Image (cartoon, rainbow, N blue to C red):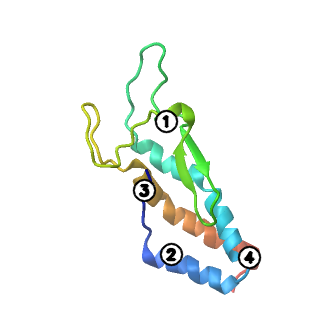
Amino acid sequence: MSAVFSIEEGEFDRLMDSMKHYGEGAGDIVSGVVHDSGDDIYREIDPLIHPSGRTFKGHSSSAKGARWQRYETGEPLAITVATTASRRYLYFPDDGSTTKKHYGDQQFMRRGAEAAAPRILEKGIDALIGKFGRS
């Protein structure tokens, strides 16, 4: 399952203008920032996860606060935050369905990514300025 999130149009336009201004190599710099932003996104998603309250022997603890995330950075200007193999049991009910014990449509991943986006955009612009200087 994939999720789509949005960022403020003005912020995105500011980043794109900066990339155009600095020209060749700017995309690689911003892509590097995006690829390195996984922990920023994780820090926004993790508080949105409700603790499972698991305490019985033989089962792992709640995902909240655990290192459940993995990052895929195979595309330029993109990062995918997903769960590690040991945490694939996590139920992120982004499809709107509800189960007996889980309320659906909480959108943890999307909401966390949206919360981290302004900081990542700012880091991208700062990286461009740092590499190419102020103008």
Determine whether label 3 and label 4 are within 8 Å by CB.
Answer: no
Q: CA distance from mark 2 to mark 4?
A: 18 Å
**As displayed, is residue 61 above or below residue 120?**
above
Query: Along the horizontal axis of the image, is 20 left or right of 105?
Result: right
For marks 2 and 3 on the same chain, the one whose residue lies earlier in the sequence = 3
Mark 3 highlights which residue? 3
Identify which residue is drawn at 28% across, 48% down: 96
Q: Residues within 10 Å of mark 4 (few under 14, many from 20)?
A: few
Q: Check disc 1 and give the amino acid type.
A: Arg
In the drawing, does residue 60 fall left or right of residue 105?
right
* Residue beneath the point at 51% across and 33% down: 87
Q: Are marks 1 and 4 in contact (CB under 8 Å)?
A: no
- Badge 3 amino acid: Ala
Q: Amino acid at mark 2?
A: Phe
Closest to the observer: 129 or 49?
49
Q: Secondary structure at mark 1?
A: loop
Viewer-side label of 2, 1 = 1
- State how far apart marks 1 and 4 are (Cα): 37 Å
Q: Amino acid at mark 4?
A: Gly
* Residue drawn at point x = 40 percent, y = 22 percent: 54
Residue 101 picture quarter = top left
* Residue where numbered disc 4 is placed: 25
Which is more foreground, mark 3 or mark 4?
A: 3
In three-dimensional space, the C-alpha distance between marks 1 and 3, rounded to whole angstroms, equals: 17 Å
Tag shown at residue 12: 2
Mark earlier in primary sequence (1, 4): 4
Residue 88's disc number: 1
